[in-house]
Image (cartoon, rainbow, N blue to C red):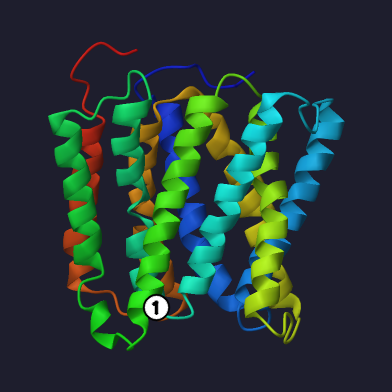
Amino acid sequence: MSDFESKEYLDTRAITTIIILTLIWGFNYTAIKHSNQGISPVFASALRSIIASICGVVYCLRKGERLFHTDIMLFHGFMVGLLFGLEFACIYFGMLYTDAARSVIFVYLSPFVVAVGAHFFLRGDRLTFIKTVGLVLAFTGIFIVFYGRPKLAKPTMFIGDILEIMAAFLWGATTLYIKRFMAGKVHPINTFLYQLFFSIPILLIVSLILEPQWIYKIDLSISASIFYQSVIVAFLSYFIWFKLIHNYSVSRLSVFTFFTPIFGVLFGTFFLTEEFTYSLMIGLPMVCTGIFFVNWKTGKAG
C-alpha cells in the first residue's frame, strides 16, 4: 500500500521527505499572505480544499482507488474532515485578531498535543524523558525565534490567540485520530481526500458568516498563489504527509514540523523583507537539537 517501509524510527528517506515538506509548508505562509490581497482568507482556504479535492478525485479515478468507503471508515473520514475544517476556520478567523507570528507559535503547539496524545492513545509511541527534553528544547527555540513580536499586540489579540491554540489542538487531534483509526486500514489517498472533501462545507459556512466579500481582485500572481496552496501544498504535500504518518511513528514525524515556522521566517525575510533577528540565529540550533533528542535511538526499533 505504501512506498515507505513501516518502522518506528525515521530513516534517511523519511527525514529528507519531511524536511522538504516543511520547506513547502514554510513558504505557504508567504503565499497565503499574498493571496489575501485579493481573496478573503477563509474562502481562499475553502477554495484550496475544493481544488485539492478535485485533484484527489482525479488521482483515485486514474489509479482505480475507491473514492468513498461504505463502512465505518466513512464515518472516520467525516470526523477527520470535520477536525480539519474547524482547524483552518480557527486559524484564519484567529488571524483577524492576532498577528501571523503569534499564530505560528500557537498553532505549532500541535506536536506537543501529538506527542502527549500518542503516549496515552497509541501503542509503542511512548513519551520518554529524552523525547520530552527534545520537545521542550524545540518549543523553546520557537519562542526565541519570535521573541519580541508580541509587543505589537492589539487589545483583542487574546481572542485570536485562543483560536490559534484551539487550531493546534484540532491539528494534533486530527493526526492522532488518523493514526488510531485509519492508518493501515485505508489507502492514504482516501485519508487525504476525506480530510479535504468534508472540510469544504465547514469552511464555506464560516466564510459566509465572517466574510461579506470573497474576491477583491484576481491577477496572475494571486492565481499562482492559489495554485501553490491548492495543488502543491494541499494536494501533493498533504498526500505525502499522510503516507508518512501511515507508516512511521507519528510523534517522531510531528516534531519535524517545528522546522515549518523557521522556514516561514526565512522566506518572510527573503520575500517580505522582514528582519532577520538574533533570536532566529539562537532558536534554529535549539530546534535542531530538540529534533536530534526526539529521534535518539534509545532502544530497539519497532
Picture residue at 57% right of the left edge, 19% below the top: 184
Horizontal placement of 106 versus 283: left or right?
right
Residue nearest the viewer, comparing 255 with 26: 255
Picture residue at 30% right of the left edge, 85% below the top: 153
Horizontal placement of 105 versus 16: left or right?
left
Label 1 sits on what residue type? Thr
Residue nearest the viewer, comparing 29 with 93: 93
Picture residue at 62% right of the left edge, 78% below the top: 210
Q: Position of residue 281 (x, y in %)?
A: 20, 63
According to the picture, the residue beneath numbered tag 1 turns out to be: 98
In the rendered image, the vertical position of residue 9 relative to residue 198, given as above or below = above
Q: Quadrant of the C terminus?
A: top left
Q: Dividing the picture into quarters, in which one does residue 191 lie? A: top right
Residue 285 visible in this rendered orientation of the protein = no
Q: Residues within 10 Å of mark 1 (few under 14, many from 20)?
A: many
Residue nearest the viewer, comparing 274 with 92: 92
Q: Position of residue 112 (x, y in %)?
A: 30, 45
Disc 1, SS: loop
Picture residue at 33% right of the left edge, 76% below the top: 158
Horizontal placement of 103 versus 42: left or right?
left
